[in-house]
Amino acid sequence: MLSTVHSARGLEWHTVSVLWTIDGRFPSVHALNSWEDLQEELRLMYVAATRARERLFFIYPAQIYDRASATIFAQPSRFLDGISEDTLEKMVFRM
């Protein structure tokens, strides 16, 4: 099933994949200017992560160019920094 973070409240799935967990997308570049907006994005990440019963994946590209802002995003979400390496296993896929 495909769901947005906003519509996932109260639901659970065996496996959850959170897409675009790259700084500039999650959290959004627009949220970086306000502490309150950044906290709201963190809350949304928490909602997304707690929907998984068994498996949770945070997926992000190595880098992406945003034409609208002429910016290259290349850092994983700052929200992933607080997760210990014992908990978060990193896997790299190259195409």
Image (cartoon, rainbow, N blue to C red):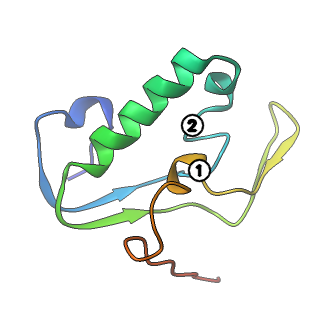
**Residue nearest the observer in this picture, 84 or 78:** 84
Residue found 48% across the figure and 26% down from its top: 39
Please indicate whether residue 92 sits to the left or right of residue 33 in the image: left
Q: Secondary structure at mark 2?
A: loop
Q: Secondary structure at mark 1?
A: loop
Q: Is residue 49 above or below residue 89?
A: above
Front-most of 54 and 68?
54
Q: Is 13 placed above or below 8 here?
A: below
Q: Quadrant of residue 24?
A: top right
* Apparent side of residue 78 relative to residue 71 in the rendered image (left or right): left
Q: Which residue is mark 1?
A: 77
Quote the CA–CA distance across marks 1 and 2: 7 Å
Q: Position of residue 15 (x, y in %)?
A: 21, 65
Q: Residues within 10 Å of mark 2 (few under 14, many from 20)?
A: many
Residue 54 pos. (x, y %):
16, 69
Give the label on residue 27, or none.
Answer: 2
For the residues labelled 1 and 2, say whether their Cβ atoms are less than 8 Å apart.
Answer: yes
Name which residue type carries label 1: Ser
Rate crowding at label 1 as few (under 14), some (14 to 19) or many (20 or more) other CA atoms within 10 Å. some
